[in-house]
Image (tube, grey):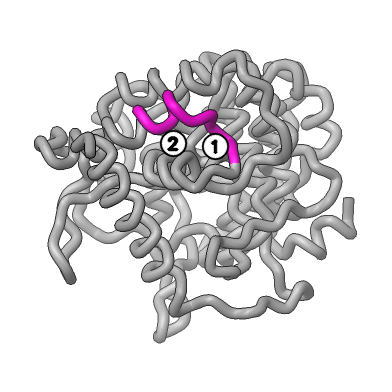
Amino acid sequence: MDRRYMLVGFVLTFLAGFWTGHHGAAAQKTDPRKLRAMPAIPTWKNPQCVSANIKESEYFEIAASTLEHIPPHSPDWLAIGAERALSQDVYRGSPGHLGPRVCTPPAIYARVVAAFAGKPIKGRFDLYEVELASHMQPPPTEVVDAVAQVAFDPRPVIDDGIDGQVNGDIRPIARTVLAGFGDQSVRFATAAFEQVSSESSIGTGAAQVAAAGGHPEALSRIETLMNQLLATVPDDKPIPLATRDRLYELAWGIYFSGDSAKDHVAPIIRLMGRHVQSGAPPFGVVSLHPKRMCEVLSRIYGDDERVKGDFPYCADDTPLESYPQGAFAVASAQKR
């Protein structure tokens, strides 16, 4: 048997085991009334990564080659395994120890783009396909349309893993990914602007798409919403978790607007001068600097040192605050 196909079987068997092992213990039925929408925030990753070694390079090669031989977004388990593999970061490590993130070679994602290009996509993207699409720069039109289909579905799009665990409404993260496509989100800017709000990650995700698509009123609307949220909390009090999350998502909307962002950073700077709540189980919540905003402001300015000079906590070794949690999907759908 060809060594490549032996490796395919080994890797995809490993993937299935990892996926089940990672989620299986937590799998449970979720009360629809408690269903949350995912946050409209780009997935955080360690900016530092190491070059792939021989074994890791084979891993990437197998996944990309699989999608070149089997149509992507198909029910074939080999294609599903390959898409899942490339949608997630790879970390070097050993049992019980997570090592450094491994850099996925850009040529790998270029091959994925080519595999999707020109092929009609039937049905709706799952979460792992939306995550995979976020790595495609630039994405083919078919992928942009598939992500937009999820992003603007009128009803919650519920993701459940292969083990049955319900992960929540994925429309907000789909909107963030769509905004990350830049100019390719122009077609959706008007529809997105009509749904902009600060009530949920559905509304803030819409703000990101409207800003990325260049809607003429998007940035002023985002600034207004951020200032209104900031005004609800006294300056000497930490910003509550839900308010913090909506502010973070709106700040990303300013970034996604591109060159215009530099003229609209005032509410981000105000936010960075405050303290925010951070989840710290089992102790409840603690008050921290909004350190996740350092990356946003650095991207807008294109100057990491300037941000560190203005906000020294961006350069220290204190941990990041807890990751945004999204909003209740059912409640947000009812408000729309």
Disc 1 crowd rating (10 Å Cα; few below 14, some 14-19, many 20+) is many
Residue farthest to the bottom, as pictured: 282
Q: Relative to 76, is 151 on the left or the right? A: right
What's under tag 1, amino acid-wise? Trp
- Which residue in the protein does label 2 denote? 296
Magenta-tinted stretch: 65-74
Q: Residue at x 26, y 26 (%)?
A: 105
What's under tag 2, amino acid-wise? Val
Q: Classify mark 1: helix, strand or loop.
A: helix
Q: Classify mark 2: helix, strand or loop.
A: helix
Looking at the image, residue 236 lies above or below residue 202 = below
**Given contact means CB atoms under 8 Å apart, are the residues at marks 1 and 2 in contact?**
yes
Looking at the image, residue 2 lies above or below residue 126 = above
Disc 2 crowd rating (10 Å Cα; few below 14, some 14-19, many 20+) is many
- Which residue in the protein does label 1 denote? 252
Q: Nearer the viewer, residue 283 or 229?
A: 283
Label placed on residue 219: none
Q: How many marks?
A: 2
Instruction: Give the x, y percent position of residue 228.
Output: 71, 48
Instruction: Give the x, y percent position of residue 152.
Output: 78, 38
Instruction: Give the x, y percent position of residue 164.
Output: 59, 69
| Quadrant occupied by the N terminus | top left
